[in-house]
Amino acid sequence: MVNHYFTALQLTINDFWFSHSIAGTFLILSFFAILLALLTFLLFSFFSYSPLWIHKISEGSRGYFHPVAAGLFFAGALFIPFVFGLSILWFLSISFLLFWGFYSRSEKGIAVVFLIAVGLSAWSLPLLLTFFTAKSPMLNQMVRNHQEDFYWSPPEIDPAEPDWRGAVIHASYQTQKGDYRRAEEIYQEALDERPGMVLNNLGNLAFYLKEYPRSIDLYRQALNAESGLVSAHYNMSLAYREMLSFEEGTREYEIAKTLDNGRVEGYTRKSVQFPNFPLIDERFEKMDLWRQAVTPHPDQIAHAEKIWQGMAGKIPLRRSAVVALLLFFGLGISSFLFERFYDASFCALCHKAICNRCRRTLLSYHLCGQCGTQFKSIKKSDMALLESEEKRFLAGSFLSSSFPAAGISP
């Protein structure tokens, strides 16, 4: 019983549609997780470092700007892209530019990871969209061919499909109908793309037409194109036996068993189950299915372009990863150009925002004027107090705020 359950589990995992749905769900959830994490990081930046800007604006105006008015001014500068109808990319750029100089080294590393991840995710939007619209008629028929669905309904694709995959599907359907000559003509269209597969299947058509010497020659050609093709050896053994060449047939059968005994046993069971189709056709491989599934259709590319344009304006989608890298380098340069604007910090004791004008330095600690007056002489207990307060404040980082019930110190 347990063996049957494990066999069913293995068949489920190997099923293409199952693995495709799992991969698609994982990619889409990862994409939304990146966006959610980016939003969390922006909120962390806003609530952590906005007080520094508000205090700096208020102090820089010599008291003309009340902290509330300074806060409104800062919010206006932060959300100005939306006022002028600019894309969200400009909002992200201004947000990172305003907070970049206040980030610690680890926070800058997190910001860089987010920029690259969002750029690559946007660049792969057409691929992500394929998992919503992957069940095209072509892919459905390819999966049926891969799963050896022998009794097909007519394929739901255009018979004049120029792609070699369509030719293989229609040739397989003509083989099922018994129109071997027509199937042979169609297979010729796919010969250059997959010679091993097509030559083996052409040998099967010659076998069904009772042209056994020609079928053996075609199997030989298939082996020359793709050595180790188990089906060609197996089919050749049946062709030799039809010609009453049992010694050659047994030799080819043994070669096939040597290459893959389990597969040959499966071939034998199929021959018994489907006596009208005793030969083994080469089918699409799973890699063919994945290539078809992840190849974006022009409609998907167009939809992805519209989504990207809503985020970045007229910048082409293919440049999204480059835009992310350029934004990163721009932030690095801006930190040097505007270094003097990022001189605000938090008081190590009361955690109020302070700037150069109201900062008091006690050894390596920055204090506000009110807290600085408390230390007329430095004692060992004072140093312990400063160290504990600073550690408590640093604990409210972005990484800790990502977990439930974690918070940022006020």
Image (tube, helix red, strand yellow):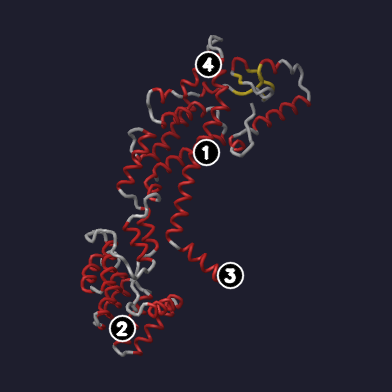
Q: Circle 1 sits on which residue?
A: 37
Which amino acid type is shown beneath numbered disc 3? Answer: Val
Residue 306: where, in percent of width, then height?
A: 34, 38
Q: Circle 3 sits on which residue?
A: 2
Image point (33%, 81%), residue name: 236
The reply to whether dot 4 and dot 1 touch (C-beta < 8 Å) is no
Residue 23: where, in percent of width, then height?
A: 46, 53
Q: Please identify, in this view, whether the residue under mark 3 or under mark 4 is nearer the observer.
A: 3
Q: Please identify, in this view, whether the residue under mark 1 or under mark 3 is nearer the observer.
A: 3
Name which of mark 1 and mark 3 comes first in the sequence.
3
Query: Which circle marks residue 346 in the picture?
Result: none
Which amino acid type is shown beneath numbered disc 4? Answer: Ala
Which amino acid type is shown beneath numbered disc 2? Answer: Ala
Name which of mark 2 and mark 4 comes first in the sequence.
4
Label 4, secondary structure: give it. helix
- Label 2: few (<14), some (14–19) or many (≥20) C-alpha neighbours in 10 Å: many
Distance from disc 4 to disc 1, alpha carbons, whole Å, reads 28 Å
Q: Circle 4 sits on which residue?
A: 70
Name the quadrant of the N terminus: bottom right
Name which of mark 2 and mark 3 comes first in the sequence.
3
Compared with residue 195, is residue 261 higher up or lower down, i.e. above or below? below
